[in-house]
Structures are given as structure tokens and as C-alpha cells.
Amino acid sequence: MPPECVALVQAIDVRKIALHFVVRAWRQDGTGYTIDYGVQEVRGTTQGTDEGVDEAIQRALASRRQAIEDEPYRTMDGNPRVIDLSLIDAGWRTEAIYGWCLEAGQQKWKPAMGFGKSAGCTSAAFHEPTRTERDKKMGQRWFLSKRPRGVWLVCTDADHWKAWEHDHWMRDPEKPGALFLYGHRDEQHPERLSADQKGHFSYAKHLTAEVETEELIKGVMKRYWKSKSDTNHYFDASYMTDVAATMLGVPFLGKPVAPAAMTVNDWLAARPKNGSSKIGANWKPSKKKSIERIDGITALIMALDRASTQPLAGTSVYDSRGVLWF
């Protein structure tokens, strides 16, 4: 586990024959390190029937829990480090996952479902509550929903977090919020892939099994997720580790940091997304599509409009006083 990490999380994608898990450590600035990933085999299932599947999945989850208890992850100085939170995909064999989390303890093991239009989602829309209620607790593009038997389900905006996952793998590694994968480069032959890099080929294929793309359909630009392969299990587990980190309060996660070389206006202009999908239409900032708040650039647009269309008042109020603070 890299130094200065404040959270250690795990996410598990559930299938009939295997569990795909990803373990990620997080620094205070939102930088993430994938320190482990792998497959926990599900034994005792039979092709063509679901008989015994629930029990087999629960045994596999128990084996995974036992494995990390027997050989815990460790800090750089060799001290054992307990995983703070594990999210388990409950989109399939839901009741079995609920039962496991209740038995294991929901403080550290929680069921999760993804909602959106990308592959593997429970439904095509993510409906975020407007406020925290007795049976719902709001988060950052996720919320907790209370289900029967006292189960708290983590409902996630899968499309948002998959896009976040892709964006932050491409982030400048010198900036906060970048994502890293364990291993070493070939220092003697930097133009070649090292053994570690070749070993991560399968993980990389999973992460790129889906892509967010734009296509012109009947004169309207549509943005959607396109599946290139059904082998996306590490991708699902990876984006769930991002959600788990926000649940633990990792700061700055998903929030862009203004580089020192950029002016404030440049940074504000980089935040909003265009809310119009028609070719040639007026550009308008969209709060729904943007990655962060758009208040600054919206105020600037309004000020420019007023300055260009309204007659000059002659003098400014700031000629006689400074800015008032409340």
C-alpha cells in the first residue's frame, strides 16, 4: 500500500462462476492506486441451472473475506491494513448478496447496484433523491436506499462513475486525482512493455470494454455508452471503488483542481458542458452534463451579455466603494 493513503477499499463484481475483485488505496487528494485485483472462483454451480447458485456465491464471498484476513494488505512499513469498505454488486442474485452483507456486517460490506444506460445496469435511469430522508441518504452521485430486512443498498450513477474512471486514468500523473496501477516499467528498454505491463493486459481490456461515444442521429448529436466486449467485470469493480472512496469521505474526489498555470477564467470555462445537442445551435452551459459547478462561468456570460447589450451607466458603483462581503 503506497504511503500517505488514507483509505483502502474493495469492490466485487459477481458472476455465476467467478467473483472479480479490485482493491484500491486512496490518498487525501483523491489519487487512487489499484494495489490488487483478481478472481475468486465460485465453486458448486452447474451449467444450465441456478440450483445452488446463491449458496455457492456466498461461499465464494466467505472465501474472499477469509483470504484477506489470512493475508492482509500491508503498509510500506509492514503493518497490516484492514479494508475500510467493500461494495458487492447486487444486480444479480440480489437476495443472496443482501443476506451475505447482513451476515458479514454492513459497516464494512455493502451491496451496490449501478443505474444508467451503460452495460450491466439494473435500470436505464439514475434517479437521485432531492434530500436525505428516513429511508434514503444522499451522497455524491450515489445514495443509500433502505431495503427489506434492514439492508442499505448503495445506488450508483454508473454512467457518471464509469466516465470518471476513464477520465482519471488519462489524467496527468503529476496532478491530484490520477489513477495508478502497481508494477514497474522496463527502465533498460523504456520503448518496450515490461513484464508487469504485459501482465495487466487483461485488466486493461476490461477497463476499455465500454466506451462513451457521440453519434449524429437524425440531425441530433446523441451521447451514449457503447459495449465492445462483455468482459467488463474489472471495469465495474473499479468504478465501484471510486464510489466507495467518496462514501469514506476522500476529499477532492472527482473535483478538478485549478492548475497554477491557468487563469481563473480559463479554469471556469473548462468546467461546463454544452447543453444543446443540435448542430449549429447556440451554446449553453448545462448543469446536468457538467462535471462541476457552473456558477462562475454562468455569471461571466450574464455579465458579458449585459455589457454588450445594455447602455453604459456612466459610472460604476465600485468607483466609490469596494466589494461588500456578507
Image (cartoon, grey):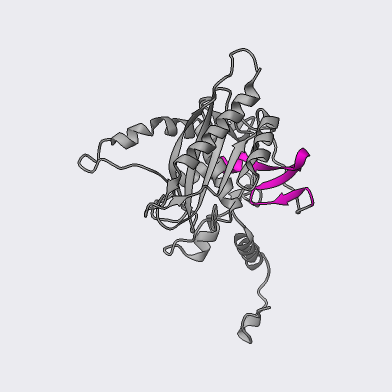
User: Is residue 9 visible to the viewer in this orientation of the structure?
Assistant: yes
Residue visible at 60% across and 24% down in the picture: 56
Residue furthest to the top: 48
Q: Is residue 36 above or below residue 27?
A: above
Q: Is residue 324 left or right of residue 31?
A: right
Magenta segment boundaries in residue numbering: 134-163
Q: Is residue 163 above or below residue 295?
A: above
181, 104: nearer the viewer: 104
**Where does the image place residue 146, in percent across and percent down from the top left?**
75, 44
**Where does the image place residue 32, in percent across and percent down from the top left?**
46, 49
Residue furthest to the front: 70
Residue visible at 61% across and 39% down in the picture: 158
Q: Is 148 part of what is drawn in magenta?
A: yes
171, 271: nearer the viewer: 171
Q: Is 176 part of what is drawn in magenta?
A: no
Q: Quadrant of the C terminus?
A: bottom right
Q: Is residue 199 left or right of residue 169?
A: left
The image quarter in which residue 187 lies: top left
277, 313: nearer the viewer: 277
Q: Is residue 152 above or below residue 42?
A: below
25, 326: nearer the viewer: 25
Residue furthest to the bottom: 320
